[in-house]
Amino acid sequence: MNVLKHVWLDLIVTAIIIVATMWEPNWAVWIVLIYTPVMLVLKMLPLAGGLVQRQFQQSGQNGTPTWLYHVLYGVNAGFLLAASWWYTGAAWLGIWFLSWMARRQPEPSSS
């Protein structure tokens, strides 16, 4: 249950992406089109600014397994690309890649 507390937004976004790609209601399309670039920028900022260590030290303490984020980002990209949402799907592949890159950053030294 503790894991759900930390991934509830990601689960909701995945559900909205599925709804947007299958039935295309306007509200869901707009949420996807607004949330995706915001998420992409949020994933790029820590890598560009060297803030990765502090961000992921805090997020790693919540007990959420990393594989869960990989599954959700993969499902998001998969549904978007299958529905021919090429740019948005590519953006989610970028989000997925940036998340992977951020996790690979070395631990900060305590000197």
Image (cartoon, helix red, strand yellow):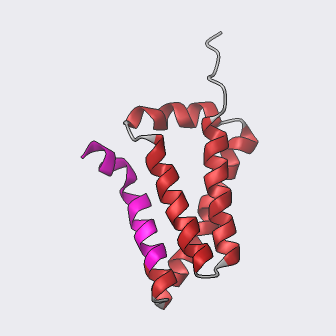
* 79 falls in the magenta region: no
Residue 15 position (above or below residue 44): below
| Residue 24 seen in render | yes
In depth, the one of 70 and 108 nearer the eye is 70
Where is the C terminus found, in terms of image quarters?
top right
* 2 falls in the magenta region: yes
In depth, the one of 79 and 110 nearer the eye is 79
Residue 70 position (above or below residue 32): above
| Residue 33 seen in render | no
Residue furthest out toward the right: 48
Q: Identify the magenta region.
A: 1-18
Picture coordinates of residue 21 (x, y %)? 51, 82
Left or right: 81 as drawn, with respect to 61: right
Residue at 60%, 37% in the rendered image: 103
Residue at 39%, 52% in the rendered image: 7
Picture coordinates of residue 77 (x, y %)? 58, 66
Residue 2 position (above or below residue 11): above
Residue furthest out toward the left: 1
Q: Quadrant of residue 39?
A: bottom right
Picture coordinates of residue 66 (x, y %)? 48, 42
Residue at 45%, 89% in the rendered image: 23
Q: Quadrant of residue 56?
A: top right
In depth, the one of 5 and 19 nearer the eye is 19
Residue at 31%, 51% in the rendered image: 4
Picture coordinates of residue 22 (x, y %)? 47, 85
Total marks placed: 0
Left or right: 16 as drawn, with respect to 90: left
Residue furthest out toward the top: 111
| Main secondary structure type of the part rendered in magenta | helix
